[in-house]
Image: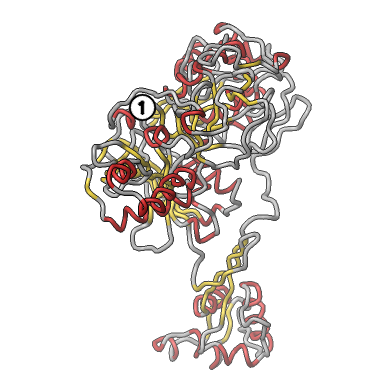
Amino acid sequence: MFKKPFHTKPRTNIRSSSTRSIAQETRKQFPNAWDPAIQLSKDDANKSGDDLAAAVAVPIPVPDKLQAAKFVSHVGDKGEIFYDEVGEPLWLKAEVAGSESTQILVPTVYTQWMFPTILPVLYTSAHVMEKLKGGADLMVPGLLVPESGLPELSKGSIVAIGCPGSLAAQAIGILAFDTKSVKSVGGVKGKAVLITHTYKDCLWESGSKKELPIITPSDIGSNQTADDVQAEPISHVIGSSVDDSVNADEASLGAPEGGIKNSNNDNTSTAISSNEMDDLLFTTLKQVMATVLGQDIALPLLPIVASTLYSTYMVPNSPKGKEVDIKGSSFKKLAKFLKAADKRGLLKLKEIRGEMYVKSFDWSHQEMVQYTPYIVAPAKDGLASVNKDQPQASRGSTKDSGGIIIEELFKPSRALVPLFDDIGAQTDTGFFTRKQVRSVLEDYIKGRDLVDAKNSQFVKLDHRLCDGLLTKGEYSSMTVIRRDQLHARIQEAMTLYTRVTVPGKEAKLRTGNPPTVDIICEKKMGNKVVTRVIGLEAYGIDPAEIAKELRTLCASSTTIDPVPGKKNEHSVLVQGHQVSAVTKLLDNRCKLPERLLTVVDKTGKAKKAKNKN
């Protein structure tokens, strides 16, 4: 979040009531940090003179006087930073990747250094730590696991990351998996900690720029050990440039001599060179083109965002036992690899509003004609993968039965009630479906012999139909009406209700058409394009969950903001022109019918707002 300089407003002193509120929140969330302070407050009454002065000098997690400054990170994340009187950043309040809450309080490394027990500490090697400082997230294989196993923590917990030999945090982040009963991470893939803030990042530079201290368990009177950890094999770190030659032996960097043991040598993967990784990338691309993005499937999806091609299609379709890593190749960047593939003739690229898209694939390329697909491991949920012997799924497959159900119901107006009563048309709820309304009208026409003898497409108007459906001017001039017009008029004259049934929740009935989810693409701060999603709460969809999904799916930052003038309603903002990604996510994951989505493009194109309702 703070890898690059961030924009901040001037610091302002906050009220004592706000300070107390922050202190109360931190007491509840981080009780270990307050234990010495609580004990101090109990003992102060018995102290005097020098003893009392020394006691007062003991720091507390939230001092009496705080300054606050709102910030916007280089990727658009918003939040607030709390500083002490001398300008040291102590706390951060923002929407943090991996957290279950919209905004949470996170201590900075400065606070963790003062209160080492405030957070559980996980360990990694010095080599990997440098990559975390460069903006990477910590992967599971990069963890160093104590012989007793990892501490039992739940997904979403705030943790400190350090190197063996010291309890001082060099990174703060959000745990991405449950650690209960984890004794080894050998062979496990995926993210372990989503990094929020690191030592020597721009947030650290906004303070006193203190050097990293060495904190041992004896310094805090704890039985916790900082060096009794074992090194599991270290694989690549997301977003980093770790060389492919990194292995378990390098995990001992920064650890005390004899303090690290490698207990999983058998699972250490064989390192490959950058040239071999280049070949693996091209092989995986051809595998994707030959299977999950075959010509019949890919054409409706084009153009495809470059990052989506890599994360959604290439990564899960790597050969068994291998994993593509753009950072481990000679290209280092996805754009360079795709330009090489373009030059090779496998695909064509196109830049749209500053973002790279794959415009087309060449399935007739000589390399594709000669290519034989391999069988990949079964895909995880949400990742695209097709085995050679498996039939490819059609893109137009029907939704499962767990989708959102929208029902249109009609209730007779006061003028139409006598017509329904005459033929005894009743329902248990008092509401009629569109089909039932049509049936009621047909029964009334037949029962009153109102079909025009000269033309069966016309219906004669009696006093009930005139009272319920005609205006004053038409009352004396119309004697017959077309049957289709009569059906249209009766539905217009009735009150429309919509019943929305979300799986697992009680059905809700509302007047009028069903609410729509607005997907708005617009420009912010010059030519920066963002996509905003509004109205998710109407269908029981958590904006925070959608923000997390889009953050991964689009490889872009996301934020959640309150909708002005609408209580308890929030909008999700994702960087880039992501209309296609948002609609697919709402359709595939949330089972939201397409007719409930309203798409508006304000990016300058000569397009009208498209309402799919």
Classify the position of the N terminus by image quarter. top left
User: Where 374 falls versus 392 (above or below)?
Assistant: above
User: Where 552 falls versus 444 (above or below)?
Assistant: above
Residue depicted at 56% across the width and 72% down the height: 509
Say which of 566 and 387 sits in front. 566
The image position of residue 308, as x and y in percent, is 52, 31
Q: Residues within 10 Å of mark 1 (few under 14, many from 20)?
A: some
Check the image and tell me how it is coloured: secondary structure
Where is residue 501, by image quadrant? bottom right
Say which of 227 and 365 sits in front. 227
Does residue 310 appear in the picture of this structure? no
User: Where 308 falls versus 125 (above or below)?
Assistant: below
| Outermost residue to the right | 389
User: Where 95 falls versus 375 (above or below)?
Assistant: below
Say which of 40 and 197 sits in front. 40
Say which of 325 and 152 sits in front. 152
The image position of residue 558, as x and y in percent, is 43, 41
How many labels, in total?
1
The residue that disc 1 covers is 201
Residue depicted at 33% across the width and 30% down the height: 204
The image position of residue 138, as x and y in percent, is 53, 27
Residue depicted at 71% across the width and 17% down the height: 267
Where is residue 282, by image quadrant? top right
The image position of residue 564, as x and y in percent, is 34, 59
Would residue 361 be found to the left or right of residue 199 on screen?
right
Q: Secondary structure at mark 1?
A: loop
Does residue 563 appear in the picture of this structure? yes
Give, as a three-letter code, the residue at label 1: Asp
